[in-house]
Every structure is written in structure tokens, then in C-alpha cells.
Image (cartoon, rainbow, N blue to C red):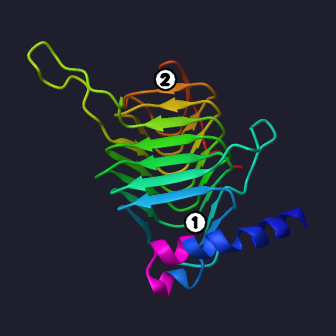
Amino acid sequence: MIRIIEYILSFPISIWTCFSLLPFFQAIRLPICVKYGSIIRISGGKVIIRGNVHTAMIRIGFHKVPVCNSRDKTQIIVESGRLLFQGTAHLGRGTKIYVSEGAELVLGNNFAVSASSQINCYHKIRMGNDIQFSWDCLVMDSDTHTIYTVSGDVANPNREIIIDDNVWIGCRTTILKGSHIPEGCVVGACSLVTGNNFKRHTILIGSPAKSTKEIGKWEL
């Protein structure tokens, strides 16, 4: 009953989001469902949906977990960049997505965030299909401040992040610029992922994370 009431109260912001961001032939199907109280701000940017468009395929702010602050607002901010959905997605309560000017964030099919995680995209982040984030994770492809060498060159440029298909990312994991997580991996809680020296179908653990035990598959 509570869930039904939440969807009814969320109907106005969901309609506004769909018809203000999407082409009419997509918006009429109401593919984006936004929980009331969420913050959606698209400042010259674009939200794009590819694939089979259907009702409530993208759910923003509804899912929550007991260990997270239920009052934490969900925020989607796109400033002259692109947020591309390639299928279904659910972004749990307290999730914060920021796409900077000229940047591109690509989310594959069946993308999920449990709650209270942050994705900060200043350059390019590409995520494949069947990716599950736990809570309190951080993904950022930039240091957000510039460091210069003694000769005046930029020492810390932004670098693309790539996460391949079928990856499970444990709670409180941090994924930094230039990271590439290969297919079929599980990232252990509180790990720091940086670089691309990882093997497919392994458990990544540590700070910095390393491929440890090989696995066959994982499932929810």
C-alpha cells in the first residue's frame, strides 16, 4: 500500500520529467518514474533512452536500504553533457549523478544502484549491461582540480572509466579515473579501484584493488 501511495504522489514529477526531457513518442510511454522529492536538473544537457522504451523502465529514488539515510535526496544533474540509458535502470534513494559540460555517462541495460552512491562524470564513463552497485559507492573520472607540472603542463587530466558487463560492486567502493573493470568481476566492499590491470571473472579486493580469486559467475 505504501509503495502504491509513493507512485501516486510521484506521478506529477514523473510526467514533467518525461515530457521535458524526451521526444514526445517516448515521453507518452512514461519510461522515467521519479520519486517525489528527487532533484532533476538538466541545464542544457540531454537525457537519451535507446532500445525498447516502456513504462517505468527507469526508476529514480524509490529503492532504499535500511543502512542508508532515507531522507537523503536523489539528484540527477546534467550540465550540457549527455546521460544515455541503454535499457532498464533503477537508481536507489540518495543516488547522486552529475554529468558536466561536454561529458558523457553511458549506463547499460539492467543497471542498478542500491542507494546513496555518487557518479561524477566530467569526461566519459561507460558502463555495460547487468551492473549492480551497492550503497555508498563513488565513481569519478576527474580529480575536479587541476595540477600542473613545473613546465606548466596538466599533470592530472581527466580519464575515461569503463566497466564491462556483469559486474557487482560492493558497498563503499571508490572507482577512480582511468579504471577499467573487466567482465564478470565482483569488487569487494571498501575497495579502491584504479588502473586497468585486472582479470575477467575475478574478485577485486583491496586498496588499491587487485584481482584475487577466479570465479565462475555471480547472481543476485
Question: What residue lies at 68% left-to-right and 56% top-to-bottom?
Answer: 37
Residue 110 in view, yes or no: yes
Label 2, secondary structure: give it: strand
Point out residue 171 in the picture as x, y percentages from the top left corner.
65, 33
Task: Give the Cα distance between marks 1 and 2.
Answer: 30 Å
Q: Amino acid at mark 2?
A: Lys
Question: Compared with residue 159, is residue 147 higher up or lower down, i.e. above or below?
Answer: above
Q: Which residue is mark 1?
A: 88
Q: Amino acid at mark 1?
A: Thr
| Numbered range of the magenta stretch | 17-26
Task: Using a 10 Å C-alpha cutoff, classify the residue at mark 2 as few (fewer than 14 neighbours), some (14 to 19) or many (20 or more).
Answer: many
Label 1, secondary structure: give it: loop
Question: Compared with residue 68, is residue 89 higher up or lower down, i.e. above or below?
Answer: below
- Between circles 1 and 2, the one closer to the viewer is 1
- What quarter of the picture does the N terminus occupy? bottom right
* Residue 62 is a magenta residue: no
9 lies left or right of 83 = right
